[in-house]
Image (tube, coloured by chain):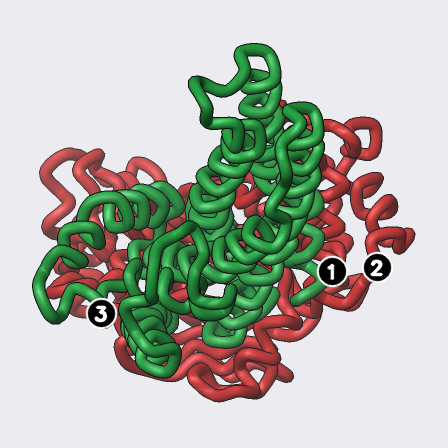
Chain colours: A red, B green
Amino acid sequence: MGTLRAVASAVLTFDSVTKRYGSRSAVDGLCFEVAEGSVTGLLGANGAGKSTAMKMLLGLAAPSSGQITLFGALQGTNAFATSVRRTGSHIELPALYERATARQNVAIQCAGFGIGRRDPKIDAVLETVGLSSRSEDKVKSFSLGMRQRMSLALALVHEPELVVLDEPINGLDPEGVVEMRELIRSLPARGMTALVSSHVLDEIERTVDEIVIIREGKLIAEGPIASIITTSGIHLRVPAGNGEAALAALTAAGIAATAFDTGEIRVDTGDQPGSVVAKLLADAGVYPDELRPQTADLESVFLDLTSTDERAS
Amino acid sequence: MFAAEMLKIRSMPAPRLALIISLALVLVAAIIVAIVGPTGTNASAYYDAPATAGSIAVSVGAIVLGAWMIGLEFASKTMRLAATVQPSRWRLAAVKFTCALLLILFYSLVVLALSLLIEALMASIGSVSFPFTTQLDDSISLLLQSLLWGAFAFALALLFRSYTAGLVATLVFSLLVDSALALIPTVGKYSFGSATKAIGDLAAGGSSFGSGAPSLALGVALVTVAGWLIVLIGAGSARFITRDLK
């Protein structure tokens, strides 16, 4: 079970949400919030529970326990159903009517929201996702990248307040990835909040403001991306055979440290300056070959956090 | 939501194809009998052949369209899209059920009306008298039966969450299971097909297709059909509403 980090004006809240399939928990006591106007990345390996979490917030799957609040409405209430209509989503593979044209697909989605089939929003959204020249073609002739764009058009056309995108850059070419990034980044300026999952951590790092990292359905880390990347502490490399002594000295001083098979040690210095670590090691007779501030990217933080979690578990 | 379902019907090829194939069957039967001519002294074949083709087409077409209206979303994996547009699942199922009935009604009316026209034309070509009232009664009976079988197919597609499974299960049920049930003494007349036919016949004046007296009184037949549909649609809806969507 996690605890909620207070977020000003959250549009979405997961509070100790668990989803079980038989004896297996796809989501396990998950707690996080998505702030209004933010772009939040939901990260996790395959099977971590990202898609399940997204399906639950859209009312497509019911949680086994815990509470989901969407625009202030609790899951399971009539108000929640109304709130779901304030979202736009793309979950897993694009869900499209293959034998209908791109325009017809968008028009069908629009009709569900009371938007007429000749409304200029249809042309506008097809233009936005770069499919205006193929609007009269049947979707069955589209490539995966074009289907991704179509799915995004369906998610955006009714101007939702929360956009939920699961792996939105799958199948996109490099140009498409850049366009998608710019589009997602532009959503807050259009009054939308976005929750985006992706395996491409480098892309997520460039796209989102906040991240939520989950593993095996559990929350591992949550917060502004800048703070998560810079709270990595110090990176050490000690001579062979000194790892145990270094760890013992740091642990005895109450400083969290993790040793890796490569001889590297990651030290979470907290509020303490790096000089304290250097002195502790020297007092223990350990002289590091390398001592530098951790300048991690999201990928290394993600791998580090998940591998640390593996050790703990 | 209703507008979206209507737009799906207009945008997808399946309803148009069902209509075109059905009308083509009626036309082909008429053309064949016009070229070959009736066998022996059976002059009524001039209008019976297209009428039979029309009745088979409407019977199968109604089942196809009933299963298609809900099965489309499962087949194209768009149910999650539909369920975020209309998050109230029971309302979503109700709208789709209503649209399925309207679609089958429109399709059956068009095919049966054009079939009647072609039958009358063929009768004049063969210089035989055309029993318009009898053929109209048959068409009314068929229209009601196609609506009820379409609802049955909708219920099975909803229950199995699959267009193909719903379609195949309904066809197998109507051709094999229901026929076998109808053979059981005493209770056979309460099979879905028997009760449906009784309703159609009674609504058409009690003597359509030369089938003699209906096996059930109208009230009993209505209750029987309602019972079958309530159980099947209830089970399908319960599964649809309570289970997670993929």
Q: Residue at x 49, y 59 (%)?
A: B141
Which of the two residues, B245 or A285, is positioned nearer the viewer here?
A: B245
* Figure quadrant of residue A35: bottom right
Q: Amino acid at mark 3?
A: Tyr
Q: Is residue B229 above or below residue A200?
A: below
User: Residue at the location (61% across, 17% down)?
Assistant: B34
Q: Position of residue A170 (x, y in %)?
A: 52, 35
Left or right relative to A119: residue B123: left
* Residue type at tag 1: Ala
Q: Secondary structure at mark 3?
A: helix
Nearer the camera: disc 3 or disc 1: 3
Mark 2 = which residue?
A: A116
Q: Which residue is mark 1?
A: A111
Q: Up-down: is A242 above or below A252?
A: above
Quarter of the view holding residue B237: bottom left
What is the secondary structure assignment of the residue under circle 2?
loop
For disc 3, the marked residue is: B190
Residue sitting nearer the eye, B130 or B164: B130
As drawn, is A32 to the left or to the right of A266? right
Residue at 70% over, 46% down: B10
Q: Are labels 1 and 2 assigned to the same chain?
A: yes
